[in-house]
Image (cartoon, rainbow, N blue to C red):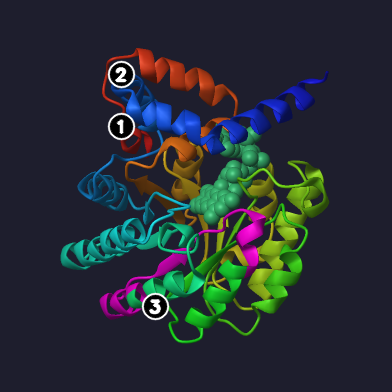
Amino acid sequence: MTTTNLEQQFAEAMKSIARRHDLKSYVEKTPAIYRLLQRAAAKYVAGEKREEGLEAGQRLMEKGYAVSLEYIGENTADVQACEAAALELSRLIQSLEERKLPARVSFDLSHIGLSIDSKLAYKQLVTLASQAQQAGIELFISMEESGKTDSILQIYEKAAAVHGNIGITLQAQLNRTPQDLIGLQSIPGRVRIVKGAYQEPEQLSIPRSSALNERYLLLVEQAVRQGHRVSIATHDEAVIKEIMLREWLHEPGVEFEMLYGIRPDLSSQLKQAGYPVRIYLTYGHEWYLYLCHRIAEYPPNLFQAILDITGSGEIDSAKDYE
Ligand code: FDA
């Protein structure tokens, strides 16, 4: 077996672990294991409380980064929990307004109702969008598994027709995405291009490869040409180098966006070279799946997790940004 195959197998195994409810529930019900893994998650998640997310965000903004804040969670299966998640997002918008912090607010639609009823997700989305619009804050919808792509895009299109402050994430790994992007031509909202974090069937997607990088670059170019403001959300240096050669990087509204705790050195270099860089910060107690995905994407993060778990010092990724 080649190293690439082995890495792919590892990534697939980690993504399956991310989806295992029995393992997640074991972690949540076992305080000692929870505390240990929480230390590993702290590399990528600012904390469990809103205050911790805001504090890390403020520090990054003081260093010259733009910030997105996500209250983590997805696939929430009861109405009360969906309403509680929407309430937390509403309080986050309020806190940002009170502190005059111009951060973007990101979330999964399945955290606020999509797993139950798309009407519930839509209703909660437009309520949040009205509040955010009055506060001058932008909302951003994440993209989830391919089984939800149609409903997420439908809800986005309907809400974005009324509220101009909502953006959408598209996954380059899905074969449908170039066509989906064409479908968004008449909607002026910001578009975030990511490679895609979910394990998808072979017939619907392409794996990490030079073909995926090529498609990623074409999608960014297509989005810029369609007149969208674009977030280039990747840590892939090969892709970033290619993008730096293209003139449209200097178009207004085009930015790099990277996940908190991942390649802070690269974010710092890009910022110091004068490029607009946004850091995507997460907070909340639903960090299990998020942590598994970060390890799946880059197997050496497993060793980092072990070091963080067994160490005793404070884990503070914000200090790694220059
Ligand atoms: P890729 O995974 O190909 O990695 C290329 C290189 O980047 C690696 O070799 C390594 O050097 C570095 N790298 C990548 N991940 C790393 C890690 N975890 N730790 C250390 N180094 C790493 N996905 C999704 O499905 N829906 C969504 O809504 C979002 N939202 C989102 C927002 C933002 C701002 C970002 C940056 C990413 C997402 N993602 C996402 C995740 C995205 O789909 C993807 O899984 C990760 O960004 C990793 O892919 P890369 O483009 O970095 O490249």
Q: Marks 3 and 2, how far apart in space? A: 40 Å
* Residue found 53% across the figure and 74% down from its top: 156
Residue 95 lies left or right of residue 262; in this view the side is left
Q: Amino acid at mark 2?
A: Ala
The quarter holding residue 306 reads top left
Where the N terminus falls, by quadrant? top right
Q: Are marks 1 and 3 in contact (CB under 8 Å)?
A: no
Among the two numbered marks 1 and 3 on one chain, the one whose residue lies closer to the N terminus: 3
Q: Which mark is residue 32?
A: 2
Nearer to me, 207 or 242:
207
Where the C terminus falls, by quadrant? top left
Q: Amino acid at mark 1?
A: Asp
Among the two numbered marks 1 and 2 on one chain, the one whose residue lies closer to the N terminus: 2
Residue 230 lies left or right of residue 3; in this view the side is left
In the figure, 26 relative to 198: above or below?
above
Q: Residue tagged by mark 3? A: 126
Among the two numbered marks 3 and 2 on one chain, the one whose residue lies closer to the N terminus: 2
Q: Amino acid at mark 3?
A: Val
Q: Residues within 10 Å of mark 2 (few under 14, many from 20)?
A: few
Q: Is residue 216 visible?
A: yes
In the figure, 147 relative to 222: above or below?
above
Q: Secondary structure at mark 3?
A: helix
Q: Is residue 130 magenta?
A: yes
Q: Marks 1 and 3, how far apart in space? A: 34 Å
Q: Residue tagged by mark 1? A: 316
Q: Is residue 50 magenta?
A: no
Q: Secondary structure at mark 2?
A: helix
Q: Magenta stretch: give its range.
A: 128-150
